[in-house]
Image (cartoon, helix red, strand yellow):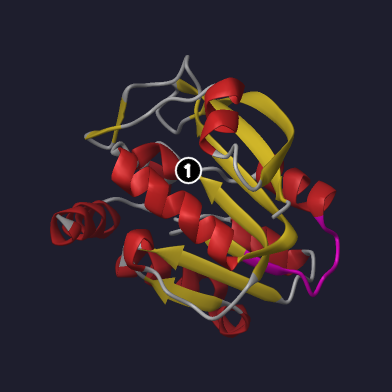
């Protein structure tokens, strides 16, 4: 199963350019704004889950954040980001891993995930995700998670997804987290279509 998923994403990043995937954002403003509203300490330890070839890392480096990790199952996606950043890529910790197998001794102030979580469709995988956040997010650290809303698509990149509301996301993270806020956003894809996202922010409290 893991190998199939890894191959799926490797094939996408090997055959499509950065602006040929539906999730592409030239400026990930919402993610940046939510991170800044949670923590402006430039030494905050931030991990971008499923970050791939996202421009979020570029923006965080421009804002002088110094402790950034980017995790993705696709090595090609990470290589593309590193090539784009050049020398700046050396500042970032790049992690090529299936999130469900990810282990680290690092602890993070901010866990950011735009569009990975909604690909986890089984209860087992969702439970693994929640437990991992609990384990590696620091006390009073922030979870920022963007998924398709109930008005979003049912599939993405050929894969089934789960769609979420504020209430259903609160239920997933009901133990050990304090709900802070949510917002919905229409994402305009490079193909002139729109996708409805919902962002939820939580604080780890136990």
Location of residue 155 in the rendering, given as x and y in whole percent from the top left corner: 29, 27
**Residue hosting label 1:** 24
Residue 30 seen in render = yes
Location of residue 15 in the rendering, given as x and y in whole percent from the top left corner: 23, 54
Provide the major secondary structure of the magenta segment. loop
User: Per the image, is 57 magenta?
Assistant: no
The local secondary structure at tag 1 comes to loop
Segment tinted magenta in the rendering: 39-46
Q: Is residue 183 above or below residue 58?
A: above
Question: Splitting the image into 4 quarters, where does residue 91 fall?
Answer: bottom right
Q: Is residue 185 above or below residue 9?
A: above
Considering depth in this image, is 134 or 6 the residue closer to the camera? 134
Considering depth in this image, is 24 or 156 the residue closer to the camera? 156
User: Which quarter shows the N terminus?
Assistant: bottom left
Residue 49 seen in render = no
Considering depth in this image, is 200 or 93 the residue closer to the camera? 200
Considering depth in this image, is 123 or 194 the residue closer to the camera? 123
- Residue at image point 45% right, 23% down: 192
Location of residue 74 in the rendering, given as x and y in whole percent from the top left corner: 31, 63
Location of residue 60 in the rendering, given as x and y in whole percent from the top left corner: 70, 63
- Residue at image point 46% right, 31% down: 189
User: Per the image, is 43 magenta?
Assistant: yes
């Amino acid at each position: 199963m893991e190998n199939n998923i890894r191959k799926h994403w490797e094939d996408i990043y090997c055959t499509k350019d950065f602006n040929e995937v539906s999730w592409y954002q030239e400026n990930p403003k919402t993610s940046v704004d939510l991170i800044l509203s949670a923590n402006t300490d430039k030494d905050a330890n931030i991990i971008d889950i499923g970050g791939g070839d996202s421009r979020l890392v570029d923006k965080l480096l421009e804002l002088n954040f110094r402790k950034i990790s980017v995790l993705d199952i696709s090595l090609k996606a990470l290589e593309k980001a590193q090539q784009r950043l050049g020398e700046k890529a050396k500042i970032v910790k790049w992690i090529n891993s299936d999130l469900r197998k990810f282990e680290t001794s690092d602890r993070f102030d901010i866990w950011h995930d735009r569009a990975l979580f909604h690909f986890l469709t089984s209860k087992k995988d969702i439970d693994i995700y929640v437990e991992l956040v609990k384990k590696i997010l620091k006390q009073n650290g922030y979870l920022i998670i963007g998924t398709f809303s109930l008005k979003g698509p049912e599939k993405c990149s050929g894969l089934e997804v789960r769609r979420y509301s504020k209430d259903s996301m609160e239920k997933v993270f009901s133990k050990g987290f304090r709900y802070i806020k949510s917002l919905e956003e229409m994402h305009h894809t490079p193909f002139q279509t729109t996708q409805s996202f919902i962002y939820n922010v939580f604080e780890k409290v136990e």
